[in-house]
Amino acid sequence: MRLVRLEYVSRFQVVSGKGGTGKTTVAAALALALAAEGRRTLLVEVEGRQGIAQLFEADSLPYEERRIAVAPGGGEVYALAIDAELALLDYLQMFYKLGGAGRALKKLGAIDFATTIAPGVRDVLLTGKACEAVRRKDRQNRFVYDYVIMDAPPTGRITRFLNVNDEVAGLARIGPIHNQAQAVMRVLKSPETAVHLVTLLEEMPVQETADGIAELRAAELPVGRVIVNMVRPRLLDGDALGDAASGRRKEIAKTLTRAGVTGAAGLVRPLVEQAAEHTQRVALEREQRAVLAGLGLPGYELPLIGEGVDRAGLDELAAALREQGAGLQESGRGAGA
């Protein structure tokens, strides 16, 4: 029986990673994993790519929370594509009661101007909407969502994106925008939040992950786990790797012949070449694992699914996360302080 140590799981989990590492796929799988056994998660997208809708084979996500999947045990996954312009309209209504006047500003292009000319404000709006979902409670004073998962910008931008308080300091030192930024930062720097970084066992993604962790720590933002994605199976054991590295062709030919393989002599060379390539990759991956181990963070590993991850693939990845302990704690949806 496999024992997993239970631990506190942050309610707001931010997923970042170098482009091409599959961070959107990992965020979706994590939302499914955390939604198991009757829990409810919200999967948030902030880059406008509609990657979540594509993964779940759903229509483009509107600016509203919509259920897109049911997890094992009856849990639910909701999704939201946050639009900065619409979030600003919400903000203007919330703090200034502009209502129709805000919509008129949008028609005039003022909303687009505000979210483009002041990127710090844009980030406050995007992160603020997600943090509002983290804090939101129902009439029974229970959290509406057990977990909120954000498919965040890439590693190179994640610290600046999350460190919104510093970003708006020069724009608004007092007033609602300043207060909103501070409220966001209280959530982002609390134990409720964990920033996960997705990587591959390759030199550039691993280096960018190490740099991203250093930047997050310097900004005092809570680093969560390193999630190694697309891990390929190890096809050869230690002895076989040694044979492949040494190119022992005669022994390989004899083995093929004993196994009844016809044309064994012609197969030896391509087999040896492929085995040598596999041996080199295993050695490189071993080096990158050592680098990741030196970062001093816990991690998850997810297998390579193949070309194009569909819902069945997401379920497989979610199951792998659950097996490694993701979400194994008491539900967070209850009366909170």
Image (cartoon, rainbow, N blue to C red):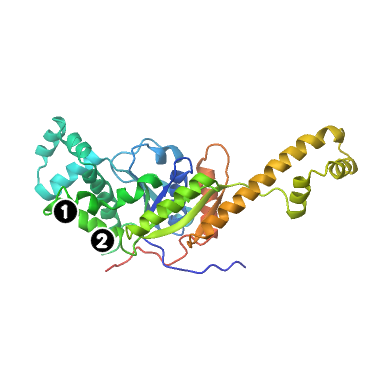
Residue 2 figure quarter? bottom right
* Residue assigned mark 1: 178
Q: At 30% from the left edge and 38% from the top edge, which residue is drawn?
A: 62
Helix, strand or loop status at disc 1: helix
The percent coordinates of residue 134 (x first, y second) are: 30, 57
The percent coordinates of residue 278 (x first, y second) are: 68, 44
How dense is the environment of label 2, judged by Cα within 10 Å: few (below 14), some, or many (20 and up)?
A: some
Residue 67 in sight from this viewpoint: no
Compared to residue 58, the image places residue 97 above or below, namely: below
Answer with left or right where residue 268 lies relative to residue 190.
right
Residue 263 figure quarter? top right
| Whether label 2 touches label 1, CB < 8 Å | no
User: Residue flagged by tag 2: what amino acid is it?
Assistant: Arg
How dense is the environment of label 1, judged by Cα within 10 Å: few (below 14), some, or many (20 and up)?
A: many
The percent coordinates of residue 178 (x first, y second) are: 16, 53
Indicate the quadrant containing the C terminus: top left, top right, bottom left or bottom right.
bottom left
* Residue assigned mark 2: 186
Answer with left or right where residue 31 lies relative to residue 293.
left
Q: At 47% from the left edge and 55% from the top edge, which residue is drawn?
A: 226
- Dot 2 or dot 1: first in sequence order is 1
Answer with left or right where residue 111 lies relative to residue 232.
left
Helix, strand or loop status at disc 2: helix
Label 2 vs label 1: CA separation? Answer: 13 Å
User: Residue flagged by tag 1: what amino acid is it?
Assistant: His
* Depth check, front residue: 143 or 10: 10
Residue 289 in sight from this viewpoint: yes
